Image (cartoon, rainbow, N blue to C red):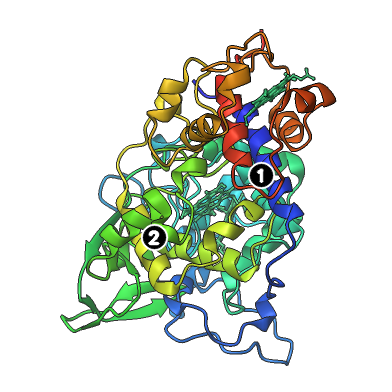
Amino acid sequence: MRNPIGVLCLLVLFVSVIRAKPPQQAAKTPDDKTGDTPSWAYGFTTPAGPRPTTPNTPPAAAAAAAPAQPDNSPKQVPGSTLTFTRAQIGDRFGPADWYPGDHPAMPDVVAHGRKPDVWACGLCHYPNGKGRPENADVAGLPVSYFVQTMADFKNGARKSTDWRKANTNNMIGFAKAMSDDEIKTVAQYFAGLQAGPWIKVVETDTVPKTRVNGGMFLTLEGSEREPIGQRIIEVPEKTEATEVLRDAHSGFIAYAPMGSIKKGEALVTNGAGKTTACGVCHGANLQGLGPVPGIAGRSPSYLGRQLYDMQQGSRNGVWSALMKPVVVNLTNDDIVAIVAYLASRGGPAVAASSAPSPIASPAASPVTASSTGGDSLVAQGRARYESYKCYDCHGKNGEGTDDAPDLVGTHLDAAGIAKFLQKPSADADGKGMPTIAASSPDLQPLVAYVMSIKSAPR
Ligand code: HEC
Ligand code: HEC
Ligand code: HEC
């Protein structure tokens, strides 16, 4: 069982804790960037370079552009009985839905958009939400996260570091034009869809030569290869099925440098001295936790772009603050390794209700909490409960003693616990309860631990 309210409280708390610290360095704006974007993540072969000074409106997403020579022949894909022309497949206000049996009825905005400003979400993200490397896979995202990130697009807190990335600008335009009700309906639709195996990760020294179209790498015909370097090259498994037909059953191959999955595993599971273990917030199986989105089995180009955008401050939403300390020390090589590992963690989604929750684990026993692994915030909090000897007054498992109340029955929420720890009441202070400063790395884990033993409200 999980406790989304507890998770939310913790998130709010983390944000306030992190926000309270003075910024280590001023966030750069996208316009400050002068050519050090990792082009592979943005779907380019060269760095962005400075934005040209002449104002020019970015071209509409090339992926949706009509072919120069209209091809009106009927197209088909394996596994579907339907037939569409190229114009229908790329129709911004009613793209092909090859597999209507795959998904529940689409809200009208997903299927048709809303003329003139909102294109059908299904065009780029596919009706089943699996998406493509140049946009995003959106199936199974938590509703609250979806709504928040749309608000971030809308209010300018989420942009692309690479000014050339036209489809991100399109996305921002859609978010601005949508009503709150539309966003909520779409969020609920995509949240109900299953994220699933869609990308195969292959470690290699060389990759097939590619060209880029509309922000996506496509394998060139022939057998020529080139060194991979420190890049991920993500290509459709079948070029025509993806590029031309937008077949929502045809997945992707992500080529990654040799050894990157193993290196990424270390960074993701224990931080490798450079970052925070991701499972603490993204869930032990990395498939999401409460309002925090899943990161397992997703497009490595998409994930890499987000990490870089958050590092550069181009993505700076309310919740991005939680990711700031995570990304601050990551190099391009680290990001390559992390996303290779994450993308390789495909596999069918584990039912959310059976996933152990490392932030707010079931109230039952601290033993369960610590057994969720060394990367669990709760386990860290348990260890600190021991080292501060909180048990002297509150009992071995927070059951209380004659000297101090039980913590299992506390009425305080996460923010309240954090406040109490920073400034214990006169009574607690008089009896010798330690004070934990806001800047102490012990604060979050202790709050998480107390939340984990707190019994659910009756
Ligand atoms: C022209 C193609 C296009 C269309 C159509 C489109 N999007 Fe997007 N969307 C994108 C791109 C590109 C991104 C990723 C932006 C980036 O990486 O900078 C994105 C990202 C997103 C994300 C963020 C996913 C995450 O994990 O944070 C959400 C949510 C989203 N889109 C919702 C929608 C909705 C709702 C619609 C329909 C109204 C829609 N999109 C239509 C291109 C599109
Ligand atoms: C302290 C909690 C926390 C930790 C630890 C954490 N994350 Fe996150 N992460 C978040 C939150 C919250 C968001 C949503 C940010 C936003 O809305 O802008 C997020 C978003 C992301 C996203 C963007 C997802 C999307 O759909 O666009 C990626 C990628 C990501 N995290 C990767 C990682 C990786 C990799 C690690 C470990 C190295 C990690 N995170 C560790 C809290 C965390
Ligand atoms: C020397 C005794 C002592 C120690 C050690 C101690 N506390 Fe306390 N704590 C108290 C007393 C006494 C109170 C009740 C104060 C009151 O009611 O005003 C209290 C209250 C609390 C409360 C508020 C509970 C509520 O429902 O109001 C929390 C949370 C708490 N302690 C957590 C901790 C944690 C975590 C530690 C270890 C870092 C710790 N305490 C160590 C004596 C102690």
Ligand 2: does it lie within 8 Å of the C-beta at label 1?
Answer: yes
Q: Position of residue 19 (x, y in %)?
A: 73, 54
For residue 365, above or below residue 334: above
N-terminal of the pair, mark 2 or mark 1, is 1
Name the foreground residue: 135 vs 339.
339
Q: Amino acid at mark 1?
A: Phe
> Which quadrant of the picture is home to ligand 3?
top right
Q: Amino acid at mark 2?
A: Val
Q: Residue 129 shows which numbered tag?
A: none
Per the model, the C-alpha gap separating discs 2 and 1 is: 24 Å
**Identity of the residue drawn at 45% across and 72% down:** 331
The answer to whether one can see residue 326 in this image is: yes
Q: Position of residue 383 (x, y in %)?
A: 48, 34
Residue corresponding to mark 2 = 339
Q: Position of residue 406 (x, y in %)?
A: 64, 13
The answer to whether one can see residue 128 in this image is: no
